[in-house]
Image: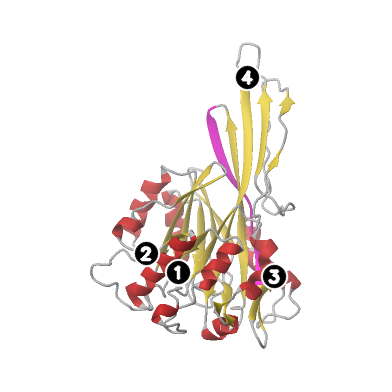
Amino acid sequence: MQKKVVFFLSFIAVLLLGCQETISLSEDEQVTVPSNEQTESSIIEMDEEEEIVQKEEKTIVIGAIGDILLHERAYERAEVEDGYDFNPMLENVASMLAKPDFLMANQESIPGGIEIGLSTYPAFNSPQEIVRELQFYGVDMLIGANNHTLDRGVRAIELAIDYYDEIGIDYVGKYRDTEDRETDRIVDVEGIEIGVLAYTYGTNGIPVPDGHEDVVALIDEERIEQDVNALRKKVDILIVHMHWGDEYALEPNDEQRRLANELSEMGVDLIFGHHPHVLQPIDKIEQEDGHETIVFYSLGNFYSGQEFDYTDIGGLASVEVKKTTIGEETTFELNNYHIEPTLVLRQEYDYRVVPFAEAEHPSISGSTVEEMIDHTNLYLAESE
């Protein structure tokens, strides 16, 4: 499917006398066009003795969705004669998932496939077809560092990565080996270099096997700092996914906040959180040197069979990245960061993901889409 449409704005000659104007989007502006990649160029004419400087602006949208956690009651409803078909479960959010220029998803239940037998809670192994459908609907990268990464051992990781390679989808957080882990995850999106890292607090007490120490990236602050420092110098925007926090808690705990600040001090631009299975607020961390980090503490469940309060609510997190180049100087801004809530409808024959605003049935908790939007913006509103 056609995911990205590029609008080219014609060059506009703007005469300025010794000054220039930059455009900033406010945090609460909404995306109003289906295509997010925008480029604008103009000529800045200086005084006669100064050379003419070209100004170019480009905007893309980075997106992330929460947990893909397939319980048996979810994947059994996708079973068809020759495998599994998750298209009906995701088709209602097709237009939503098409909005970002770069989209990531937290693949919590490992898609090791039928070769080793499918399984559900507490040791998950999911049909590989879910990956194909996520890719079809616009997901570019899967996040694999979570507490279920080792549920079915190293073999499940190998089978999942084999399938990722077969269909050509990027992944981060779980790896084949040390060489794979040390390979930078850098994605070029319309000339903007994006680096991605991912870590988890643990693996449900399952020890990492000897000789396979790098199959999953654990939260080790010294190692994280090394990774961040190495990748920071190679990219324009640095993203870290963190599997952290308390399950079913609607707000981040002190450790999440501490780690978020540590990552911000290291120079991370965007943090996406997972594990609580419910939406938590967005925050902006500002350092004394002026560096800012946008934190989505938890993106909730995007597609899951969980049936506790708020666990049927997830969302698409979006951030606009604006690149401005004037002569040889380039700057980046993060704007319009927000979550567009989704809901998993539990019906007789399937579990379907729909935009919460369009849901015909209430959430398990009884909350409304307006209440969840207010909840995710809680910290941003308090800081205004």
What amino acid does circle 1 point to? Trp
Report if residue 333 lies within the magenta region. yes
Residue 97 at x, y percent in the picture: 64, 62
What amino acid does circle 3 point to? Asn
Q: Residue furthest top?
A: 49
First-in-chain label (1 vs 4): 4
Kindly state the secondary structure of the residue where label 4 is placed. loop
Within the image, what quadrant is residue 191 found in? top right
Q: Nearer the viewer, residue 230 or 87?
A: 87
Kindly state the secondary structure of the residue where label 3 is placed. helix
Residue 374 at x, y percent in the picture: 68, 66
First-in-chain label (1 vs 2): 2
What amino acid does circle 4 point to? Ile
Residue that label 3 marks: 92
Do labels 1 and 2 touch, CB within 8 Å?
A: yes
Q: Nearer the viewer, residue 18 or 329?
A: 329
Q: Which range is magenta? A: 328-342
Distance from Cα at disc 2 to Cα at disc 4: 49 Å
Q: Is residue 20 visible?
A: no
Question: Residue 52: which disc?
Answer: 4
First-in-chain label (2 vs 4): 4
Eyeballing the image, is 113 above or below 96?
A: below
Distance from Cα at disc 4 to Cα at disc 3: 49 Å
Q: Is residue 317 left or right of residue 112?
A: right
Eyeballing the image, is 35 above or below 362?
A: above
First-in-chain label (1 vs 3): 3
Kindly state the secondary structure of the residue where label 2 is placed. loop
Q: Main secondary structure of the magenta part?
A: strand
